[in-house]
Each structure stands twice: as C-alpha cells, then as structure tokens.
Image (spheres, rainbow, N blue to C red):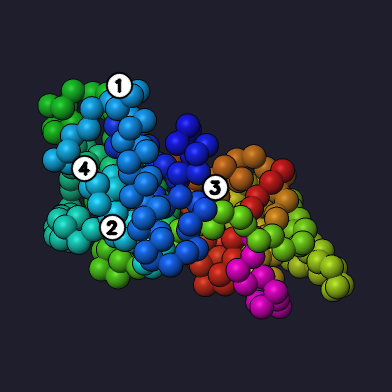
Amino acid sequence: MYCRSLGIPMLAWIDDMLSMTEQLYKDCEDDKQFQSAMRSMVVVSIILFKAGYFLGLSKCFLIPEKVMTYLGIECDSLRTRFTVPEERISKYLPLLQTLGERKSVTYSELEQIVGKLVSLECAVPAGMWYTREQYSALRGAGISPEAKKAVKNHTSILVSQQMKEEWGMWIHFLTENRGAAWRTMEAVYIKAEISSDASGRSFAGVVSMPGILEKIVAGEFYGPMLAQDIQVKEGEALRQTLQMMVKEFPLQIRGKTLLCKVDNQSLKAIIEKKGSTRMLALNDIGKQIFWMQQLGDFHCNLNM
C-alpha cells in the first residue's frame, strides 16, 4: 500500500510482487516510461530491503520488460492483455484430450485438473463457467476434500458428457488463447435502469433510458422452465431483458456497463461468481448472459 501511495502500481501475492511504470508517466513515450519503471524498481527495492525483505536476485527481473509472466499468467503491456503462457498450454492440452477419452477418473485427477483450470481464470474470462460440472462431480463423489491422498486416488468418478463438454471448451479456449483485456481504471456507465422479475408462470423486464420511451419485455414460461426453481426463472427474466437490449440498442450499450436491478441475492451471487455447483440449471442461463456481454461488448453490474 505504501508503494501505491507513492504513485507506483504494485501487485503482491505473499512474496511474489510486480511493479510497473509510475501512474504519472503511463501515457508518455516509451523512453520516459522505461526510465519511470527503472525508478520504480529502485524505490521498491529500497523499501523492501528496509522492511526486512531479501530479494532472490536469480528469480528477479530488475530490467523493465513489456511482456512478463507473473503468477503463471503472461502480462502483455503491448496489447494490454492477460494470456496463458505457451508452456502451460502445451502441458494442459494433452492432459485435457486424454481425460476426454476416458470413461472414469480418480478424485485426485479431477481435483488437480480443475485446480489448474481455475488458476487460469484471469486470462480465460469464461473459464469458471466451464468448471461447474467438474466441481459438482467432486462434490457428489462422497468424500471430503480433506480426505487422505490414498482415499482420493482410489475413489473413481464416472466421466459424464457434461464434463467432456467442459473439457472441450477448455481445449478451445487454450487453443485460441485470446486472453483477457486489462480493465480500465474507470468504468463507463450508461444511464439505463434494467429491472426484471419472475413468478411461477410469467416474467417481465423494464428498461428506462434517457431519451427513449420505457421499454418492456414480458412473456410466459413453458415446457421444462415451468418446473424450474424461482431463481432459475428470475435468471431467465434477466436474460430475456438483456436480449431485448442487445437487439434494439446495440450501439448505445457497446462499451458500457449496464446497471441491472435484481431482487434475488442467490441469482446475483451465481452470476458474479460465474456459476454454482448446486444450481446447474442456472449455469446455462448464466453462460448465455456471459456470452451476450462478450459479443455485445458490454458489462452488467447487478445490484439489489
């Protein structure tokens, strides 16, 4: 925090730290940014030394670089994106392909692969949505995550079609490796009030924006949706409302953050955490909302 108060952007995870060009020089030409990054390195090194830290010089990168791997994720300042390093891709792809051909896996194997995939979330924005079936399988295995390694190694889990589909999506993500854009310091909000709600048989959504008439979308549930939990139905109401926004106001919402009102805390938590192992039906709706945001280039901010 002290380094940040000096205007030096700083990331820290236990004893792994990443420092960058001072905020004051972030929009300057390359030479000034390089000199600023060098000053940041010297200042941070002195502060850490005086605070009692000893630097492992063999593991340090003291000369500023535009692309650097930090905590297993490639930080690319040229493209302002996080990506998965090639060595991790070459390691995980064969493993995923092999698992997809098997009929069963051990608890240990599934626990290890899902842990590896979750660690890539920073560079694979959709990733968490495609781990929930695996987490659900672990949860239904009948043993505790704290169980002994021998127990985990001898506990077999059948590979479902849903798990294979998740691994297939991860193979696609890692093969393309598009990465994730760095977030800007300030979000640009559109003054749109989106409210949606649902009952047992019907749903409605209302959108209010300056300069346009109030828009309403409503309908009735039918088929399998009628038997779903109310939280799933409220998720569908939100999806339908956002779909109407994408169709009728694609230019107005591009690059913006939409403020969406929901009255269900569980729905809000599941959307923000990118899925749940307890409500798999809501995951499908959440995935559609996620990809809607990706394709429409907008972001939803849910509040109660």
Mark in front: 3 vs 2: 2
From the image, tell me which residue sits under label 2. 65
Q: Is the C terminus in the top left, top right, bottom left or bottom right quadrant? A: top right
Left or right of 57, for residue 284: right
From the image, tell me which residue sits under label 3. 272
* Above or below 84: residue 137: above
Disc 4 residue crowd, few under 14, some 14–19, many 20+, Cα 10 Å: few
Q: CA distance from mark 1 to mark 4?
A: 17 Å
Tell me which amino acid carries mark 3: Glu
Q: Residue at x 82, y 64 (%)?
A: 208
From the image, tell me which residue sits under label 1. 52
Question: Is residue 118 visible from the viewing direction of this image?
Answer: no
Q: CA distance from mark 3 to mark 4?
A: 35 Å
Tell me which amino acid carries mark 2: Glu
Q: Secondary structure at mark 3?
A: helix
Q: CA distance from mark 4 to mark 2?
A: 12 Å
Task: Say which quarter of the image contains residue 147.
Answer: top left
Tell me which amino acid carries mark 4: Cys
Q: Secondary structure at mark 4?
A: loop
Residue 22 versus residue 19: which sits nearer the camera? 22
Q: CA distance from mark 2 to mark 1?
A: 26 Å
Left or right of 62, for residue 248: right
Q: Residue at x 48, y 58 (%)?
A: 26
Q: Residue at x 70, y 55 (%)?
A: 259
Q: Which residues are magenta?
A: 246-257
Q: Residue at x 19, y 55 (%)?
A: 88
Mark closest to the chain's N terminus, 3 or 4: 4
